[in-house]
Image (cartoon, rainbow, N blue to C red):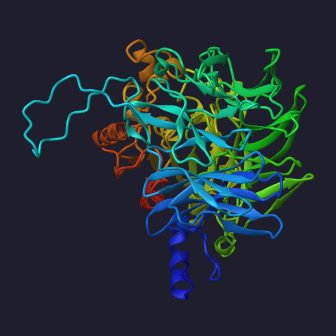
Amino acid sequence: MKKTNVIATIWVAATCALNTDVVQAANEQYLQPEDYFELKYVDQVDVSNVSNDIYFVKHQFDRVNDQKTSHVWVYHQATEKFQPIDIQSDASFTPLLSPNQNILAFVSVVDGQARINFKDTQTGHIHHSSWYPSMPSNLTWSPDNQTVAFTMFVEQPKTLPIPLEGKPDNANWAPAPKLIESTRYRLNGAGYLTPGAIQIFLQSTTASAPQQLTKGEHSHSGKISFAQDGGGIYFSAKRYASPEFSHFNTDIHYLDLKTHAITSVVERDGPDDMPTVSPDGRYLAYTGYDDNGMIYQNKALYVKDLKTGKVSVLTAGLDRSVARLQWRHDSAGIYFSYDDQGKTQLGYSDLAGDFKVLTDRLGNMTSGRPYAGGEFDVASNGMVAFPIANTQRPPELAVLSEGKISTLSNFNGKFLDTVTLGQVEALWSKSKYDDRPIHGWVIYPPNFDKSKKYPLVLEIHGGPMANYGPHFTAELQMLAARGYVVLYMNPRGSDSYGNEFAQLIHNNFPNHEHEDLISGIDALIKRGFIDETRQYIMGGSGGGMIGTWMLGKTQQFAAAAIMKPAVNLYSFVLTSDFYPMFPKYWFNGKPWENTEHYLKHSPITYMNNIKTPSLLITGEADYRTPISETEQFYQALKLQNVDTAMVRMPHMSHALTARPSYLQQKLEYILWWFDKYKDRLEEK
């Protein structure tokens, strides 16, 4: 909790100032790194068609056990009260009402084991499945309310090709070596993979053990949807030879529940995902595109008439990528989400392709930075439940009814009502490379005074095909609380601005993102409140890659904080878990086939130009941008006699949210590093 005594207030004000002109008022509190543990986030909504009660997942961080916790809650429409559904489990998530709205299915976890729970919404009685050997995903109800289909990993142990002879009983020998033969042998967040595949299961609401429907070497990891008569299941999968070399190509199939025969429904070179059957059973909606080998392509919304076989594209005129799908209750049209200029919109299209926007306020559950995204659910009366986006609050539960938005929850009010946050403002500038408009946002320090001078932090998003927007960001608000003006932008390659803008980085990344981002800095400097001797740069993943690239192009930054970068494209492609994808879509061939291209776009090629003190932060179990990339840059900086420090997060993958204390420490290290070099350029 916050310290409120006078000495603590004076100390916080002094540390927030960091030799700037920012002064904290005696009765104000600013967001601090330890405050991650105070924040709550809403997502995974499901609304009842009968009572309009809304089930959702509430996330927060456990300060004692240093972990993210997630539990299913319900908002009772009649009483306007909130209630937790499951408090006995370590975690619970994926609430899903049966078609008749009488049973709520959800997943719970205790001591690392997972099961599906079925709660009677009238009596409160809960039936549990048996404990599963793996985590269930993609829960989908059958039309008769009797079963839930889901996907789950099934281990397929391999027999070693060599015997182990001569081992005495109870001997203390070394662990057996690991034999690796598969193309995909490790995955970020999962580590080195156990042999096996993701299969489809059925779980009865009254039985204990599930029934396995699919077998074999092919994984079935995508969304699943029952046929209207309950006789089969539509699903998306890679059921072809050597799927590990085709990163995006998925087809839609039909599984007959009587014969277990599988037939192809949608098949082409490209990703066809999210099969969703209409309530009347006639249509199948899905997303996808014809793969043309570009680094990015929008996913369109398709509808296939299951009687005639005719396929229609409902979003042909929408130059954006479609995400989540939900049919209207009468099968007359489809609700879907998509990102547009950093905001996540909820759209609706009828079957003729007539389209309208319902709201642009969908919010994403991100713990640190302002990425777009968000879920929704629509009741049969048209009421939409969703987590609402707000620059001053993490996503809270909200509804859209008859054109009016009402925010229902205020889980963060008790804490954030006592905290002064920085105001967020949109910024457009023209790229110094080709005059393209580049979109961004500025977070001002609390009590900002434009007549004073402030240090600037440029923060670069990852992806690079992703986008930031006007959303709550704990990490960047904490920087603003320490007196920094924070700039975050969507340079070329960012999605939500159309295919052409995202494809500008095809076989040309990193490169002109530098000019895009510098244009935003220049626009702020012209306003007169930026201390030009105290400009800083930070970014993670794809943003870390762009950040290291920019260090080779300019020396205007007093210091840099680079998280989980890729700096040597040759080694990056050959160590990342996504290595089958990069040569085809990102870097114009295999490294040894186009070495000059790889070197040209590798930030480490330009080490002779880099003079900026650089802090490097990466998880030691990061397999997306492996820590070997960080080590290369660290050692190269040392060889160049450039000030540097490396922070290694033990056991952490590409994301740090599994242990929230690392989020706190990450930011503390960044603040320490920036403050350490606050006078560097001025002295120079």
Q: Nearer the viewer, residue 5 or 558?
A: 5
Q: Quadrant of residue 229?
A: top right
Against 526, residue 430 (above or below) is: above
In this picture, residue 106 sits left or right of residue 61: right
How many marks are shown on the rendered structure? 0
Q: Nearer the viewer, residue 228 or 306?
A: 228
Residue located at (93% from left, 52% from top) = 402
- Residue at the extreme bottom: 6
Question: Residue 22 at what x, y percent from top left?
Answer: 61, 70
Against 603, residue 417 (above or below) is: below
Residue located at (69% from left, 58% from top) = 120
Question: Residue 642 at what x, y percent from top left?
Answer: 34, 45
Report whether residue 683 is seen. no
Q: Nearer the viewer, residue 303 or 387?
A: 303
Residue located at (50% from left, 72% from top) = 15
In this picture, residue 162 sits left or right of residue 278: left
Against 439, residue 264 (above or below) is: above
Question: Residue 257 at what x, y percent from top left?
Answer: 63, 27
Report whether residue 239 is seen. yes
Quadrant where the N terminus sits is: bottom right
